[in-house]
Image (cartoon, grey):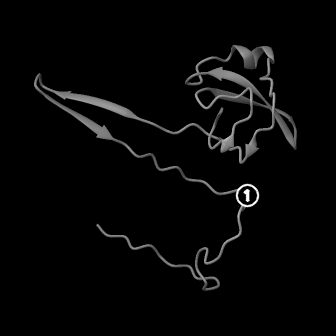
Amino acid sequence: MVGIGSTMPQAIQGLSTTSSYYVMKVDDNSFKLADAGIGGTSIVDFERGKVVGLNSTGTGYQTFKYPDIKVNVEVGYGGTVTGNFTITPFVKGSFTGAYLYESGSNYGSTILNNLAKPAVSS
């Protein structure tokens, strides 16, 4: 499931930044999208193979992204003490590819094969 991220300056007509979409692979170079509704709660269009009609290509950069990971926890201690937790998920993995839209300079380290160990304290 993906959502629509940046749509500057003009979004693709037929897609909404408030909806989520199931990705339907066509081949190794293309895909189609099925509407999953707000919050990604509907699988009906995906199961029926109903794809979203795209009415334009949009302009500028169009970004498809995984939904944000959010965790809300409300806790009550006894009858009077309550609290909220903020949880930040740690996602492990590797990049499989990247594309640089604009040229630039001074990205990252200038030292070849420099494997700096992170500072860890307890």
Q: Position of residue 67 (x, y in %)?
A: 57, 36
Q: From the viewer's side, name the closer residue of 19 and 57.
A: 57
Which quarter of the rendered picture does the N terminus lie within?
top right
Point 59% across, 75% down: residue: 108
List the residue tagged with mark 1.
Answer: 97
Give the side of residue 52 with respect to residue 79, left or right.
right
Q: From the viewer's side, name the closer residue of 105 and 122.
A: 105
Amino acid, disc 1: Gly
Compared with residue 21, is residue 88 higher up or lower down, i.e. above or below?
below
Which quarter of the rendered picture does the C terminus lie within?
bottom left
Compared with residue 74, is residue 87 higher up or lower down, i.e. above or below?
below
Point 81% across, 33% down: residue: 56
How busy is the neighbourhood of tag 1: few (under 14 within 10 Å), some, or many (20 plus)? few
Give the side of residue 4 with respect to residue 117, left or right.
right
Q: Position of residue 111 (x, y in %)?
A: 60, 86
Q: From the viewer's side, name the closer residue of 20 and 11.
A: 11
